[in-house]
Structures are given as structure tokens and as C-alpha cells.
Amino acid sequence: MSDAPGRDEPSPPPSPPARAPHPQDPPPTYTKYRARPRLLPRREVDEIAELRRHAAGEAGDRAPGVPGAPGAPRPRRRLRLPGGGRRWTWGRVLRWVLGLLCGWLLLSAALFLVSAQIQAGKVSDETKAALDDGGFPLWSATNILVLGSDQRSEKTAEPGSSTSGPSRSDSIMLLRVGAGHNSRLSIARDTLVDIPGHGRGKINAAYAYGGAPLAIETVRRYLGIPIHHVIEVSFERFPGLVDALGGVTYEGPCVISKINGGRRNGGFTLRLRRGRTHIDGDQALALARTRKNLCRPQETDLDRARRQQFLLTAMKDKLTTPGGLFGIPHGAFYRLPLIGWRTPRAFTTDMGGPTLAAVFAAMAIGGSSETHVLGTLTGVVPEADREQAVEAFLDG
């Protein structure tokens, strides 16, 4: 036997010839291996490697693709949240801010609609029947009668005012909005008119005789125009609305008045100097109710009607001007949900949420309003003056 290795070992059998894969043979299977998850994000790994190259003096040998190398694209600046966490880009921050603003507005609108629907159910069927039919206020000219009753609660009552039973309308104002209109017409409370079923008398007595339905009918006949909606202002809740707006700015002559006997007698004393003064809800209510201005004794009820119109304009400006919305610290935007809830609760109206929202929108986009006051010191308004005031109101 030879000592050569492998000479007596049998040769391996020849391998079978390769066979073409049959169409029905199953596909070959492969084993998949999952890479181990990184302990650090790729960007942080690159940053660590960059620091190591700096320590080794390799900064000059960077490749153009390495962050920080000459010719490499400059990475975008990102914001890191306090305490770590996901990094934020400026675009992501802007999207979050816009989302919060939209949510704030939607919450305010929802509260407004719910509050308005609750208040709309408090209007009597007789009042609704007394109104004229009209279109949607946003694109149809709409006349709205605003009545402020002199009936007070025990807290806000003044000598001679009513706390129960029939009461006179302390203020009478007409609003015309929609279809490009934005005008107001105040009627002096002592204006002499024909009250249906009660003869000749002061126009504010119509509310005492028959409430809102008779007041609507009296104003309609006196002016010869349709009345589509009515708003009855609550003096008790009016200050809360003004406070929700962050107060308003009064600009005009000095005013000194004593409501309910003044502060010494448990009432309220209003003192406003000439010029611009920021006032709160209680001061605004006292200003609207001031009949005798001790600072200017020559004033009449016509001046009182002008102050009421001024307050309405000031409240509108809080929601329609940049300074009123975003001013610090009295901006209305920061209180929008509270405003949305309290606004419908400050009065009673036949209008539901969508219609009332359309009225405010029409007032906002209608620009500055034209204001008019109808009345005389004697209470008798000449026919020509009345027709002129009505024409200006309808065209405004």
C-alpha cells in the first residue's frame, strides 16, 4: 500500500446535472435578519463622530458631505423643547399657534350659539307675532328695535324706577344692518306719539302698557317702517358683558351723576373727567342711565341718547379693531369664550344663534355706523323732521 494520502479513498459521486426550475416549484426561502436598533439617533451619532474627529485633529480632512465641512449644506435650525424631547421646526410652531387660535375661536363661537339659543326661548309668542318677516341679516336689510326697560332689580333700582310689574322703556333705539347698511336711530323717551289703544302719550309708555308687542307696533306706526327683530336689554347683566370685553373707553365731556342716591346713600356715584377714560361695567351702566349730569346741567334726554349710542359704538370697537382685540391689558381676544357666553345673556331677543351672529357680523363688516337722534325738548317732533330722520336711517 502506498503512503500517499487520499490515494485509496473512494472518489465522490458525480453531482447530478443541474435541472431547470420547474414552474410549479415553490420559490426559495430566505432568512431575514433585523438590524439591532440604534441607541442614539443618526444625527446624534454623526455629531459624536464629528466631535471625535475634532479631538483627533482631523477637522481639515472632512468630506464635503460631513456636517460642518467646507461646502456642506448648512443644517436647518430647530427648536428643542425644554427638558429634551422632539425638536420643533419654525413651521411646526406656526402650525401649533394657528391650531390654538382656531380652537379658541371655535370654542367662543360654540358658547355664543348655545347661549343665544337658550335666550331665544324666553321671548313670548306675542312678541314674535308682532314682528315683520325679513331676510337673513347678513345679506338683507334688517331693522332691529332695541329696548332698555327702566325696571330694575332691588340692587340696581333708583328712586322712581320700577322693580316689579309694568315698566317704561328707558331707551329706544333702532338698528339697520345687512346689505351694506349700518345705521342707528335713537328716539327720545319723552317723544309724544299715538299709542294704539291708549291715545296720545310718551313713546316710552307703550312698553308699560303692553310690553314689547305694543312697543313694536307703536314704533312701526310712528316711523312707518317694518320691525324685523327686537332686543330687550337687561340692565342687571349689562355690566358683566362690558367687563367681559375688558371695559370700554369713554371719550367726551365730563359726567358727574348719582345713581340710586349716590355712594353715600348706598347707590353709585359716577365721575368722568373730560377726555378719554377707561371705564368698567358698573361705570358704563351708570353712564347709560345718567339723566341729570351735575357737571353739565344744561344737558337733555337727547344727550343721554347720544351717550347710549356712544357706548354701543365703543363695545363694537372692542371686537372689530386691532387695538380693541389685542390691546394689553384690556384686549377682548383673551376673553373671547367669556364674551361669547355673556353676550346673548345680556339681553332677550327673538333671534337664535345663527341669526344673532349674522347681525354682529353685518355690523362688523358694515364699517362705521351713522347715528341719528329723533326728539325735541317739547316732545313734539315736526313731520318733516321725522321723515328726514327716517330717510337718513334707511339709507345709512
Image: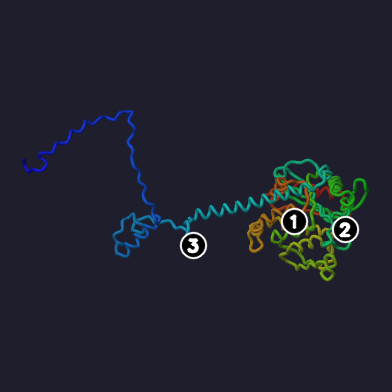
- Mark closer to the chain start, 3 or 1: 3
Depth check, mark 2 against mark 1: the one in front is: 2
Q: Residue visible at 76% across and 67% down?
A: 272
Disc 1 designates what residue?
Answer: 312
Viewer-proximal residue, 88 or 380? 88
Q: Judge left or right: residue 56 versus residue 322.
A: left
Rendered position, 346 above or below 294: above
First in sequence, mark 3 or 2: give its number. Answer: 3
Question: Residue 223's x, y, as percent?
Answer: 84, 47
**CA neighbours of label 3 inside 10 A, class few (<14), some (14 to 19), many (20+):** few
Indicate the position of residue 289 as horizontal and vertical percent values: 81, 61
Instruction: Name the residue nearer the viewer: 200 or 388.
Output: 200
- Residue type at mark 3 is Gly
Disc 2 target residue: 162
Give the residue at x 34% y 42%: 31
Residue topped by disc 3 = 83
Asked if residue 391 lies left or right of residue 102, the reply is: right
Looking at the rendered structure, the secondary structure element under dot 2 is loop
The residues bearing labels 2 and 1 have C-alpha atoms spaced at a distance of: 24 Å
Identify which amino acid the numbered label 1 is placed on. Answer: Leu
In the current view of this chain or complex, which residue is farthest to the top?
23
